[in-house]
Amino acid sequence: MKDDNFGEWYSEVVVNGEMIEYHDISGCYILRPWAMSIWEVMQTFFDAEIKKMKIKNCYFSLFVSSGVLQKEKDHIEGFAPEVAWMTKAGDSDLEMPIAIRPTSETVMYPYFSERIRELGDLPLRLNQWCNVVRWEFSNPTPFIRSREFLWQEGHTAFATKEEADTEVLDILELYRRIYEEFLAVPVIKGKKSEHEKFAGGLYTTTVEAFVSNTGRGVQGATSHCLGQNFAEMFQINFETEEGEESMVWQNSWAYTTRTIGVMIMVHGDDKGLVMPPKVASVQVIVIPVPYKDANSQGIFDACAATVKSLEEAGIRAEADYRDNYSPGWKYSQWELKGVLLRIEIGPKDLANNQVRAVQRDNSAKIDIPMADLTERVKEMLNNIQQNMFDVAKEKRDACIQVVHTWEQFVEALAQKKMILAPWCDEEKDVKARTKGDMGAAKSLCSPFQQPELPEGTKCFASGKPAKKWTYWGRRY
Ligand SMILES: O=C1CCCN[C@@H]1CCCn1cnc2ccccc2c1=O
């Protein structure tokens, strides 16, 4: 059950909901079609949006030469243990080990350095859809923490900081839309602390989700401004109009298949997955309910006609004709897979030229005349999508606790809250003071929407003058 053993509930739901299959290598998973179709819906949206921004897709090598990877020791020092290395081909050792990309800065930026010479070469804005490998050792969790995952990584270069700053937020808004408009998951936009940001960058912006059952924050996606750090490392310069050499300003940004795990954790229930209609590959499942000798062919024909008219209206519908399973079994199977709307057609429905629509999220049952079907279903799907978001937002907001003192902080943490506290912007001691078997509390982000911070407000942790409101909590 989700409330009394979240970890067990999650790993059962992702498998029984037909999203994940385990692979014999720990931390690696099979993404089955039911999960892959969610990724594709988000990819279609995001790819179209970045194309509107004149960002071009490309593909760089999976392999990183060790020379270039070591180039930026400071940025990867914390990450080095996660880098996967290829050392042999066949039974012969490689001269030099080759790294498998954990991210592609070092693969792409030598090309940036070659390609960018003058102002006319800017802005250079590339994106790639690919997999990356990070050989993590902490507890692997399907979608949330795996050793290989799919993502898109955008890498852009501009002549001015202003252009980079603007793009960081444009992309962050797309990530908010992915979560709030597609996955029906509320997120908070904010800035990572100096301690939590990407060390190789200038600043990191993030959309933070929260899993109320476990009281843990999840970094949903990140959009970094890299400043000129990588331009300096990789000599990415251009000649200005005044004929001077100037370093480019860069951004990099990504969201990953972790989005799917967050959606499952936030919406799933004890009956299984709950799929927001916007990302569900089957939005409506039509189930024939034949009855003894009643005209079952007529029922099957009505199901086929129903699927056809729904599809013609742009609704993703399927019928389940399997005759070796009972309607009741099918109801629970499709609820387990998280399909939000079921249409039953039995002899009575046939006779009255209507269907019986059953909503999964609130078990509401209504009879719909065939004539009104597509309009009513479209309306129901929109209402379900909106309702899922509203319910999730209410649940998330109920987890937010404002605190002013260390005692209140520790109490809120014990109650699995997402804590909003005034902070002096010096992180190290909070982590140390909250170490425990549940993991330490860390800063999640400083929200762009800052509440009022009256003069003289003290930091909850140090008692020093607070500089900004910051969200805290345990994290995935
Ligand atoms: O987030 C993003 C967005 C997409 C492009 N990359 C940035 C920063 C990645 C940070 N990172 C994260 N794990 C790593 C693991 C091994 C080596 C290097 C890294 C590493 O640089």
Image: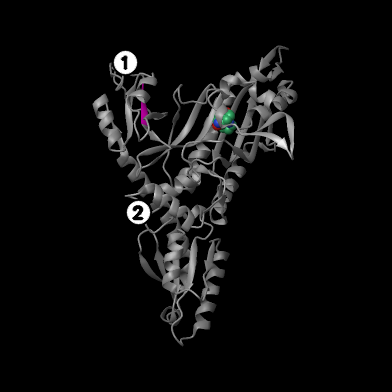
How many other residues sit within 10 Å of disc 2, few (<14), some (14-19) or many (≥20)?
A: some
Kind of residue sitting beneath label 1: Pro
Kind of residue sitting beneath label 2: Met
Rendering coords of residue 219 (x, y %):
46, 36
Name the mark nearer the viewer: 2 or 1: 2
Q: Is residue 452 left or right of residue 304?
A: left
Please say if the residues under marks 2 and 1 sit with CB atoms less than 8 Å apart: no
Q: Is residue 168 visible?
A: no
* Residue 378, label in figure: none
Rendering coords of residue 400 (x, y %):
32, 36
How many other residues sit within 10 Å of disc 1, few (<14), some (14-19) or many (≥20)?
A: some
| Pointer 2 or 1: first along the chain | 2
Picture colour scheme: one colour
How far is mark 2 from mark 1, CA to CA? Answer: 44 Å
Whether label 2 lies within 8 Å of ligand 1 gets the answer no
Q: Residue at x 64, y 32 (%)?
A: 104
* Residue 465, label in figure: 1
Q: Is residue 300 left or right of residue 57?
A: left
Predominant secondary structure, magenta span = strand
Classify the position of the C terminus by image quarter: top left
The single residue placed furthest to the front in the displayed view is: 91
Region of the chain picked out in magenta, as a range? 468-472
**Which residue is disc 2 drawn over?**
1
Q: Is residue 265 visible?
A: yes
In the rendered view, tell whether residue 16 sits above or below residue 222: below
Whether label 1 lies within 8 Å of ligand 1 gets the answer no
SS of the residue at dot 1?
loop
